[in-house]
Structure formats: C-alpha cells, structure tokens
Image (tube, helix red, strand yellow):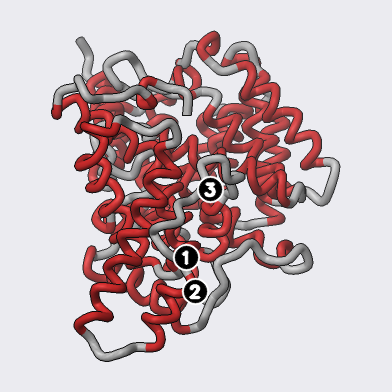
Amino acid sequence: MASDDCRPVAHISPIELQRRVEALYQRESRAVLATLIRLLGDFDRAEEALHEAFRAALEKWPTEGIPGNPRAWLVSAGRFRSIDQLRRQRRFEAFDPRTHDAAAEHGSPEHDLPEDEPVQDDRLRLIFTCCHPALAPDAQIALTLREVCGLTTEQIAHAFLTPTPTLAQRIVRAKAKIRDAHIPYEVPAPQQLPERLGAVLRVIYLVFNEGYSASAGPKLMRPALADEAIRLGRLLVELLPEPEALGLLALMLLHDSRRAARTSPDGELIPLEEQDRALWSRGQIEEGCALVERALGGQAGPYALQAAIAAVHCEAARASDTDWSEIVALYDLLFRLEPSAVVELNRAVAIAMRDGPTAGLALLEELLQRSELRRYHLAYAARADLLRRLGDMEEARAAYEQALALTVQEAERRFLQRRMAELTPS
C-alpha cells in the first residue's frame, strides 16, 4: 500500500496514530474480515480476531511503525491471536476434537503469512457465501450488509424497517445455518454460477442503493458503499460476463457518474433536471454506455434495461434534450420483464415528461389506488411535483406533506421542505 500509512510512526502522537488506525479500519476491515473467515472457518471467531488485530496494531505500531502491507499484518495478527486463544482454552477445558482440529488446520503463529502472497479476493467468496440459496432472501441481504459492507445491525434494521432484535436474530440464524449446513466458503463452480448469480446481483444492487441514497442520516450518499458495490460488480463481470452482470455494473456506473452533481456544497439534494452536467463523470458514462451495448447484445434482463434508461439520461447534454419517448419504450419493455409498482411509477413520470403532467398524473392517481405505493414516499413526491407543474398548489402541498410523513432520510426531507416552501407566494 503506497501511502503515508507505510511510514514509521514512532514520533506520531497517540491521537494521530488513533486517527490513522481508524482510517485503516474504514478502508481495510472488510477485506481483513473476509480473509479471516476463510482462514478460521467461523464468522464469529473471525470478527473477534479482526478486533484483536486492530487492538494489536495500537499496541505494537507506536514502536514498530506501520508495516508496508498493513492488511497482511492485520490478517496474520488476527489469525494468530485467535489460534493462541484456542490453545489457551485447551489448557483449561476437556479435550475437544473440534477445537483440536481447528488449531491444527490453521497452523502456528510462528509461521507468518508472506507479505508477497498473491491477493485472493475473499470478499467475492464471502458474498457468494452470504447469498447462498440455503439462506432466506432477507437473511442473505442482512448478512451481506453486515459482513461484506460493515453496516451495523441497527443501520440494517432501520433501512429495512425491521426491529433491531429481529434483525440481529436473523443474522445469528444465518451464521448458524452456514456453520451447521457446512456451506462452503467458495465461489461456485462455473456450471453453478448462472443459477447463483441472481441473488448476488440483487444483494450488490441493494448495497449500491444504500450508498447511492442512504436510508437514514444527514447525508444523502454513503460513497464508500457505492464504491464497494461497484468493485464487487467488476469482480463479477470478470468472473461471469453475463448480460445481467454487465447490465448491473453499467447501471451502477451510470448512476454513480452523477455523484458530484447530486448535492450542493452544503449537502442539499439537487434533482436530476437541475444538476450541473459538467460535473458528471464522463469516464464512468463512457464505460457504462459501452457496457450497456454489450449487455443488450445478449438476452437483456431487468438490470440491462435499467442501465439503458440511465444511459439515455446520461447522454443528454441538457435535461431538455432527454429522449423521453425512448425512456417510455424502455420502461414498457422493463415492465413486461419485471412487472412492479415502482416500474409503473417511473413509467408514469416518464409519460408526464413526454406527454405533459396531466397524462402522468392520471396514471399515478390510478396506481396509488391499487398498489403498495401508498406507503412509498417517492410516489407522493412525484404526485406533488406533477400537481405543482399543473398549478394546483393546495393539492401539491398536501402531497408533499404525505411524502414528508413517510421520509426518514434527512437530505430528502430538507429537499421536500424546500419544495413546499416554494409553493408559498413571496
């Protein structure tokens, strides 16, 4: 790792060392954990070893300096402290063959991991393990967000409107299932990949969405999560360049290309049509559009079609140049492939942009009467916007209030409140 973190720290204050170690934890802890799970064979032992490794870093690095390869050092420290703990337990407990086997398998702390050992991406193994079909879908998502992405149990529970104790038990049961069913910690064989890919893509996209639009908190985005999802998407494309894997990576890149323009310097949300398109990442857009072409060359699925819609937005030099007819046609195809109320909502908004707010509002009103969107804040935000464009300020205000009542993300709440304030004559 080429950075300031590689320099000796004997003359750095304890506060500065703490800051550096905390930054390293944010950057490397998930990768270290994934490797420790492979080496130790158990989620809970690996998590304990991870924390022991960082504790060891705070103890040793003030005198020894931060090593050139901090990740390898942390993996070794965590692994060997875990093994030492097993050996100490054996001194005081009756002989347990399982404990004996585990310590024997993982070797001795006298033999360190070589720093030039080829880096294997254990996070890819970890995500396939977390998304194993033996686990329930909600457990797959919870476990991936917890173990691969490092969200706290409370954060995941809040994101999915689940009581924290319920979510915690879900994670505990998923880990027990992996252990008791001997679910292998590996990337599936090539012939198994197609049937396993769907769950992995779904979870990666959920992780990206949490980074692209945080479920709670003062900031709209959590860029580290979006970056991690894109990284995992790239790994999947290298492993299995199927149309939907290509489509998901394209979709994430195209959405993420607008990151710098989505908020003002003080963190306020800027809607798509008002964004400074000069701030959009042309490199990500070009890469994403190229991936869309590859994805659509095969049997296009929902991710590829969503990426195609994002590409139409990104290719427009100005909001007024957007080809809404093409977007409506793509939503028609998407709805045939994957019918959902959210797709219908987005199609209604696209029709409003193509044919006028009256046409879109009629579709949206009918949709709100018959779907689960009655609990979806963006449906009321869209309704409020269409009513505002039609000049019905009283109904628009009521719709904004309904959207606010269902919104927990602070940046979105501030945006809706600003829109409401704009309805009041100056």
Q: Left or right: 45 with respect to 198? A: left
What's the distance in space between the residues labelled 3 and 2, CA to CA?
18 Å
Quadrant in which the C terminus is drawn: top left
- Counting other residues with Cα less than 10 Å from the Cα at mark 2, is it few (<14), some (14-19), or many (20 or more)? some
Quarter occupied by residue 419? top left
- Residue 197: give x, y in percent of width and height: 66, 60
Between label 3 and label 2, give the one nearer the viewer.
2
Query: SS at mark 1?
Result: helix
Between label 3 and label 1, give the one nearer the viewer.
1
Kindly identify which residue carries mark 1: 140
Q: Left or right: 58 with respect to 323? A: left
Of 255 and 352, nearer the camera is 255
Are discs 2 and 1 less than 8 Å apart at CB?
yes
Are discs 3 and 2 less than 8 Å apart at CB?
no
Look at the picture and state if 21 lies above or below 2.
below
The numbered dot on residue 135 is: 2
Query: SS at mark 2?
Result: loop
Q: Amino acid at mark 3?
A: Tyr
Q: Amino acid at mark 1?
A: Gln
Residue at point 14%, 29% (across, down): 14
- Residue 121: give x, y in percent of width and height: 57, 49
What's the distance in space between the residues labelled 3 and 1, CA to CA?
13 Å
The numbered dot on residue 205 is: 3
Residue at point 27%, 80% (across, down): 90
The numbered dot on residue 310 is: none
Of 324 and 120, nearer the camera is 120
- Residue 115: give x, y in percent of width and height: 51, 41
Residue at point 61%, 45% (across, down): 118
